[in-house]
Image (spheres, helix red, strand yellow):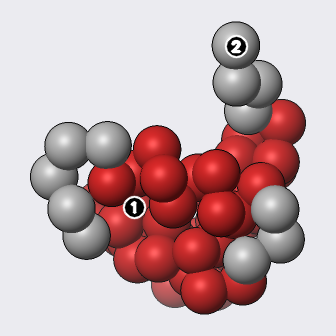
Amino acid sequence: MEERGGLFKIVLKAKQGDKEAIEEIIRCFEPLIMSSVKGVDEEIKEDLRHDLIEIIIRAVKNFEIK
């Protein structure tokens, strides 16, 4: 992904329904997601990971460009 403006461009594509752009955003935040679930009980770790991904997707869809 490009450094400057790259995430913004990908967010714009994701808002238009580009599934590859959404996947790229998730890949971008995967290290943060994994560090957030580190130390969590294995029984709920994957569910929590999916919940965090859903939150990211909702945030992208609700992102307002002004």
Q: Is residue 45 above or below residue 36?
A: below
Quarter residue 31 falls in: bottom left
- Identify the residue shown where x is 70% and y is 13%: 66
Q: Is residue 8 above or below residue 14?
A: above
Residue 29 bears which disc, if any? 1
Closer-to-camera residue (22/50): 22
Q: Amino acid at mark 1?
A: Phe
Q: Is residue 51 above or below residue 43?
A: above
- Identify the residue shown where x is 60% and y is 86%: 20
Residue 45 seen in render: no
In whole angstroms, how far apart are the C-alphas of marks 2 and 1?
24 Å
Looking at this rendering, what residue extends furthest in the top direction?
A: 66
Where is mark 2, residue-wise? Answer: 66
Q: Amino acid at mark 2?
A: Lys
Closer-to-camera residue (48/52): 52
Q: Tell me the element at label 1.
A: helix
Quarter residue 29 falls in: bottom left
- Identify the residue shown where x is 70% and y is 24%: 65
Residue 27: % across, % down: 40, 77
Residue 14: % across, % down: 69, 63
- Determine crowd level at label 2: few under 14, some 14-19, many 20+ residues with C-alpha closer than 10 A: few
